[in-house]
Image (cartoon, coloured by chain):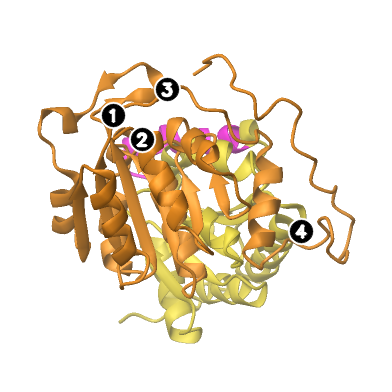
Chain colours: A yellow, B orange
Amino acid sequence: MTDLPLWASRVADGLVDAGVGEIVYVPDSPLSHVVRALEAEHGNLRATIATREEEAVGIAAGLYLGGVRPAVLFQSSGLGNAANALASLLIAYQIPALLVISMRGEEGEWNQAQVPMARAVGPLLAALGIPAFALDTVASAGSLVRSAVALAFGTRTPVACLLRRRLTSQDPASGGAR
Amino acid sequence: MTRLEATRVVRRRLTTEAVVASLGHPAYDLHAAGDRAENFYTWGSMGVASSVGLGLAMAQPNRRVVVLDGDGSLLMNLGTLATIGLVAPANLVIVVWDNGEHGTTGGQPTATARGADLALAAAALGIQRTATVDTDAALDRTLGEALVDAGPWVVIAKVRESGPAPKPPRDCVFIKHRFMAALGVPEPATAGQPAEGPQAPAPRSLPAGSRRPAPAED
């Protein structure tokens, strides 16, 4: 098992510190570090793998209705799959959730198929009225996650944290500090 | 049996269970069979009702959670059965109204009309307890087990379309507030709750006319 990147520990700490009680996710490489950090450092926090992003949003809605604060983790390519559940379930019913979206299709991308959906992430979130915060430094990652969770559950709306490539591509061995 | 008759069988069995109804006819019939605060009516997100039920069952392991889904809507999100099989919440009961058609949108056929078997699919995806029923007596008997014995359960109920039913409350936030309060997890600063932080608007009362049958607009 490789060392945990520092950014992933900070994101995981931020989720736990802010009172997130369950994680639902669709796998992605950078997100795997966040889930590992949660397992390693916060073992009692359950992380459930969904088959698709819209399903993950539905599970999160049920968790919130049952009294638990959920976070939903998926890759930028999956935001389109989640759009209707975000709109007609979370936003319509004022059900909050933290969305942690791992970005593909940014600087350094080699896969053409990842770029169009990456381009759509900002406009799509804006069209839905979902506040979004970019996480691009280790130093601010934890505090941004905590304040995004506070905004989501304080005002009852989904809020997105975008894990930028310049954050998630940092070398674990160096601790990724900058 | 019609879906409304079958829904009334479910309603007679309910005590403290949380119920999530898929949008359209399953939700309308649940309301027609007897409105209650523990009913969560979805008005959108077709296919996601069973996933909402899974999340609820995870959050409230000591409460039975019943989902009223449809064959067409479950087929939109069949993967959630695999997730339910994996998580295996013992307190989750999914009832699928299987009429072989998209009844809410005009009766377009679904794959179950041509032999697709959702009980077999559920079993293959890891659901421990499955059943297929086609009479109200069999449904009632199966529910008697499913609301007590460890699940997760998937109950496929073969039903016929019923006529138009009165629609549930249309105010999504009202539905949520009422539901969460009934489940013992009210949001802060809603009606009857102490304020914490900025005062949230109190849930609005039931919109006038929401209990009258309305012309189809689906």
> Answer yes or no: do the residues labelled 3 and 4 have beta carbons within 8 Å?
no
* Circle 2 SS class: helix
Residue B23: x %, y % from top left: 47, 35
Q: Tag 4, which chain? A: A
Residue B85: in magenta span: no
- The answer for how far apart the CA atoms under marks 1 and 4 are is 44 Å
Q: Which quadrant holds residue B96?
A: top left
> Answer yes or no: do the residues labelled 2 and 1 have beta carbons within 8 Å?
yes
Q: Which residue is mark 3?
A: B163
Looking at the image, residue A41 sits to the left or right of residue A65; the answer is left
What kind of residue is marked 3? Gly
Residue lying at the far front of the rendered structure = B137
**Sequence order check, earlier mark of 2 and 1:** 2
Q: Residue at x 28, y 18 (%)?
A: B108
Looking at the image, residue B100 sits to the left or right of residue B94; the answer is left
What kind of residue is marked 2? Arg
Nearer to us in this view, A155 or B53: B53
Q: Which quadrant holds residue B148?
A: bottom left
Q: Are marks 3 and 4 on the same chain?
A: no
- The answer for how far apart the CA atoms under marks 3 and 4 are is 42 Å
Residue B78: x %, y % from top left: 27, 45
Q: Residue at x 39, y 68 (%)?
A: B91
Q: Tag 3, which chain? A: B
Q: Which residue is mark 2?
A: B3
Nearer to us in this view, B20 or A136: B20
Q: Residues within 10 Å of mark 3 (few under 14, many from 20)?
A: few
* Circle 4 SS class: helix
Q: Which residue is mark 4?
A: A154
Nearer to us in this view, B25 or A157: B25
Comparing marks 4 and 2, which lies closer to the viewer?
2
- The answer for how far apart the CA atoms under marks 2 and 3 are is 9 Å
